[in-house]
Image (tube, grey):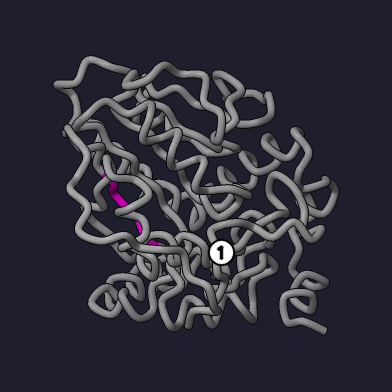
């Protein structure tokens, strides 16, 4: 039995157990789980504060901002004017949007935000192409994703229920029955796109430039139980988890479970120095 299945049988959140993960009703369930779990809420707040700082940096651009895959999150508490979206209709979702076929005109957004979304999109290259299209020059795409650091990748492979494989040869989630909106995933895809295949990213998206990758979160999300499990530590231990995160900060490139990636939409395409072809064999 996989370790995640063993844990699932003993720590699964009752609200999560009663719903199909890909169903629209799960949005409300996730919102309740986040709000009722202070440790999980602080994880979301950390990410949203980063998004908020980006929004303030872009205030001179008089255009709207969009969040894709909003789900049960609460970004509007940090950026009230942001347009929230998802592929399902639910309370707190302003509009239905498919991230690989956005309905916005070219150069009509100053920012696109995503929290834990890209590794669920079956064809992330199409999503990134859409983001490149809808962003105004100088605009930003900021996403929070699994990082696949040495420790993070080990934990994701052995303790997380979602699929994770950083040796894949392309940027797609294999269509082999691993699921839909949320159940389909490859947690390592963001690492593959933004780190392992960065040269290829530069060729495929000549108007996008990766400005910053910030690794974060050693054990906070895991110990919180995330969106599926009850917390693994009692409430009185939450303060100690915060201290643990602070102590681990210098080691985040090795132990961090997540990364916030900031990508800028350039004024004009970069000059390509070489033709980078997709990998034809398994990468390590």
Does the magenta stretch mainly form a helix, a strand or a loop?
strand
152 in magenta: no
- The residue at 34%/45% (across/down) is 205
Q: How many marks?
A: 1
Residue 253: horizontal and vertical position, in percent?
A: 31, 75
Give the residue at x 32% y 53%. 203
User: Residue 216, located in which quarter of the rendered image?
Assistant: bottom left
Crowdedness near tag 1: few (<14), some (14–19) or many (≥20) residues, C-alpha within 10 Å: many
Q: Quadrant of residue 277?
A: bottom left
User: 34 or 23, which is in the foreground?
Assistant: 23
Which residue is at 31% across, 63% downward?
A: 199
Residue 75 placement (x, y as % from top left):
43, 34
Q: Is residue 247 left or right of residue 104?
A: left
Q: Position of residue 140 (x, y in %)?
A: 28, 37
Nearer the observer, 114 or 139: 139
Q: Is residue 166 left or right of residue 275?
A: right
**Quarter holding the N terminus?**
bottom right
**Residue 116 located left or right of residue 206:** right
Task: Tell me: residue 211, above or below residue 162.
Answer: above
- Please provide percent x and percent y for residue 134: 38, 26
Q: Residue at x 55, y 35 (%)?
A: 100
- Judging by the rendered image, the residue that carries numbered circle 1 is 187
SS assignment at label 1: loop
From the viewer's perspective, is residue 121 above or below residue 237? above
Horizontal side of 30 relative to 66 (left or right) equals: right
> Which region is colored magenta?
259-263
The extreme front residue here reads: 275
Image height of 279 relative to 91, above or below: below
Residue placed most toward the observer, 16 or 90: 90
User: Is residue 260 rendered magenta in the image?
Assistant: yes
């Amino acid at each position: 039995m996989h370790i995640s299945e063993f844990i699932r049988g003993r720590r699964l959140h009752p609200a999560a157990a009663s719903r199909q993960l890909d169903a629209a009703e799960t949005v409300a369930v996730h919102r309740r789980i986040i709000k009722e779990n202070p440790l999980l809420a602080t994880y979301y707040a950390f990410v949203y504060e980063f998004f908020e700082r980006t929004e303030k940096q872009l205030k001179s651009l008089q255009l709207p901002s969009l969040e894709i895959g909003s789900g049960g999150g609460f970004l509007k508490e940090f950026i009230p004017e942001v347009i929230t979206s998802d592929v399902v209709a639910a309370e707190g979702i302003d509009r239905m949007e498919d991230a690989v076929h956005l309905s916005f005109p070219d150069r009509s957004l100053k920012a696109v935000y995503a929290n834990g979304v890209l590794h669920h999109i079956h064809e992330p290259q199409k999503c990134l192409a859409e983001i490149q299209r809808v962003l105004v020059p100088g605009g930003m795409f900021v996403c929070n994703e699994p990082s696949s650091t040495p420790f993070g990748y080990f934990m994701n492979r052995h303790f997380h229920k979602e699929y994770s494989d950083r040796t894949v040869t392309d940027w797609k989630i294999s269509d082999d029955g691993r699921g839909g909106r949320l159940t389909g995933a490859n947690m390592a895809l963001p690492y593959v796109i933004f780190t392992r295949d960065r040269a290829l990213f530069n060729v495929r998206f000549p108007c996008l430039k990766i400005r910053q990758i910030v690794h974060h979160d050693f054990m906070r999300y895991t110990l919180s139980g995330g969106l599926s499990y009850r917390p693994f530590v009692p409430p009185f231990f939450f303060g100690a988890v915060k201290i643990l995160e602070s102590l681990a900060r210098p080691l985040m490139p090795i132990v961090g479970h997540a990364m916030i990636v900031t990508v800028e939409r350039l004024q004009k395409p970069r000059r390509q120095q070489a033709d980078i072809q997709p990998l034809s064999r398994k990468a390590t």
